[in-house]
Image: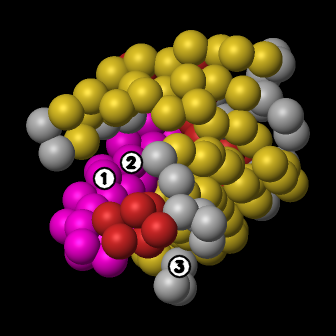
Amino acid sequence: MSNTEIQLTRHVAATPTKVWAVLTDLDAAATMLTGVIGTERITGDGYAVGTRWRETRKMLGKEATEEMWVAEVEPEHRTVVKANSRGADYTTSFTLAPNGAGTDLSMTFTADPDRSSFLARVLMKVFGRLGAKATEKMMAQDLRDIAAAAEAS
């Protein structure tokens, strides 16, 4: 079964430096991102490869907590965050590209069901469209929230 992939881009009327500062402020995520209820650091200070945290979100009317980690960092250009939960690997990439006086912020999300889990593959096929729509809506809100915080700073 192939990956589920969603990609969105939003122009932010702020410099890459300001967007990066908002994007990588894990400790303030719950106050900046509408969908995030709370975060709890597990390892690491600041924002670097290997930093781990638990993030609690409300999605489809239910709270869910996932352990996430920073997998790649190119300051002010790109970062990749990963998670593994319920039989699937999740990857979220953020890319920042200067555009005039602002920044084009792209967010790409992929979900790859564990090849060894028959149940995960079946669930992904049955609920994939519903989950993809909900995820796309959440991503769009995250991009709006990041833009608002960066533009206000």
Q: Position of residue 27 (x, y in %)?
A: 58, 17
Question: What is the magenta segment's predominant secondary structure?
Answer: helix
Mark 3 residue type: Asn
Q: Position of residue 81 (x, y in %)?
A: 67, 49
User: Is there a contact, CB below 8 Å, between mark 3 and mark 2?
Assistant: no
Does 111 lie within the magenta span? no
Query: Mark 1 Cα within 10 Å, few/some/many (few <14, many 20+)?
Result: some
Which residue is the site of mark 3? 3
Which residue is the site of mark 2? 142
Quarter of the image holding residue 92?
Answer: bottom right
User: Is there a contact, CB below 8 Å, between mark 3 and mark 1?
Assistant: no
Q: Position of residue 57 (x, y in %)?
A: 34, 32
Looking at the image, what colour scheme do you see?
Answer: secondary structure
Instruction: Name the front one of labels 3 and 1.
Output: 3
The residue segment tinted magenta is: 124-153
User: Is there a contact, CB below 8 Å, between mark 1 and mark 2?
Assistant: yes
The circle on residue 138 is 1
Determine the secondary structure under disc 3: loop
Mark 2 residue type: Asp
Precedes in sequence: disc 3 or disc 1: 3
Query: Mark 3 Cα within 10 Å, few/some/many (few <14, many 20+)?
Result: some
Left or right, residue 41 beside residue 150? right
Mark 1 residue type: Met
